[in-house]
Image: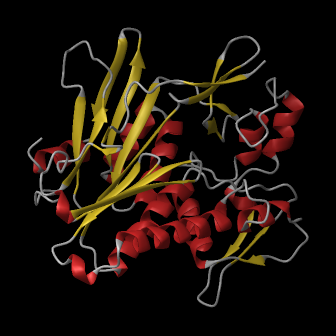
Amino acid sequence: MMKLIQRAARYLLFWCTAALVLAACGNKDTAQLTTFNGETMGTTYSVKYWSSNKQSLPEPAKVQAQMDALLVEVNRQMSTYQPDSEISRFNQMPASADSMPISADFAEVVTEAIHLNQFTEGALDVTVGPLVNLWGFGPDKTITHSPDVAQLAAAKKIIGIDKLRFQPNSSGATLGKTVDGVYLDLSSIAKGFAVDKLARHLDSLGVANYLVEIGGELRGKGRNAKQQPWHVGIEQPQLAQAKATQIVVPLDNRALATSGDYRNFHSDESGRRLSHIIDPQSELPINHNLASVSVVADNTMRADGLATGLFVLGEERAIALAKQHNLAIFLIAKTQDGFTTHMSPAFEQLLANHGH
């Protein structure tokens, strides 16, 4: 029987006072720093910001209420767990139906998903949901065996970005499908979008210094209360070469996202370990030596999607793509002796620019 296992991460984005390990941790001038936390998308979120002119900002309770309302709206648009959400209505509609109008936010995420599908050579595919469900990682947790050949063949017919009828335009985007059964799942990118959504709201309030996090995906802007860039740690496994166990990443108007299968996998009836991340081309759970991919990008939605896509590609192809497009990525790979790490040239430069 397939059993969901939650494994403690060997590396993770680590927190201080129920939040990230920041350069501001331990700062005595806490009067300038506002922090609040909440729950969304089956995980938690955290917002930190400070301003030298706090009188011009709404009360923190009002800001959090606004943030919660924005997150409720993102879920109403893109949660597959809400039967009346926009994405659920799309998933339930037949191919014969007229394309449905979708919100600007939904259209923005679909646009980025299509772009990243092409960028990652098909590795990030938001139509892979039927395969995710077949392998037991969707809403139905009662699946107790691996899918058979016939099931996989049927799923293949309804998977692919080319099965979407997407028309973005200034008067309002529409979305339809070319075959029945096409199923969108934006979980690999929507969480990053939600981080960006909250960050934009802080921008609109005139907040120049903040750090926003949802489920380990982050975006920082400006400086912390010590007038330094926000710093976030990526914890490494204990490495044989006794290097530092933490990589400290500056988020100076940048975003960070990590993808890996260390927390979410099944063991099938034969005890085989099955990753929750499915390769849309092989139709199988990924099976390579990568433990995680962390990506630093200009926005969290892109970092989130790239992390998943690069993880699907595997170590060699991820490194090659990162070098080709100057992506800042940090990889942790499994070896016979434990773990090894790799930084792309852009990631190394990012650390060097901030003295790490």
Query: At 34% across and 80% down in the image, what residue appears?
Result: 205
Q: Residue furthest left?
A: 355
Query: At 36% across and 43% down in the image, what residue appears?
Result: 18
Query: At 69% across and 76% down in the image, what residue appears?
Result: 102
Determine whether, in the image, residue 105 is placed left or right of residue 119. Answer: right
- Seen from the viewer's position, the closer of residues 180 and 59 is 59
- Seen from the viewer's position, the closer of residues 128 and 242 is 242
Q: Residue furthest bottom?
A: 171
In the rendered image, which quarter contains the C terminus? top left
In the rendered image, which quarter contains the N terminus? top right
Number of on-image labels: 0
Determine whether, in the image, residue 4 is placed left or right of residue 301. Answer: right
Where residue 291 sits in the image (x, y, percent)?
Answer: 45, 27
Query: At 57% across and 45% down in the image, what residue appears?
Result: 123
Where residue 335 sits in the image (x, y, percent)?
Answer: 40, 15
Q: Is residue 220 visible?
A: yes
Image quadrant of residue 329? top left
Vertical position of residue 130 compared to residue 239: above or below: below
- Seen from the viewer's position, the closer of residues 200 and 18 is 18
Where residue 287 sits in the image (x, y, percent)?
Answer: 57, 25
Where residue 25 sits in the image (x, y, percent)?
Answer: 20, 46
Image quadrant of residue 195? bottom left
Determine whether, in the image, residue 253 is placed left or right of residue 43. Answer: left
The structure's colour scheme is: secondary structure
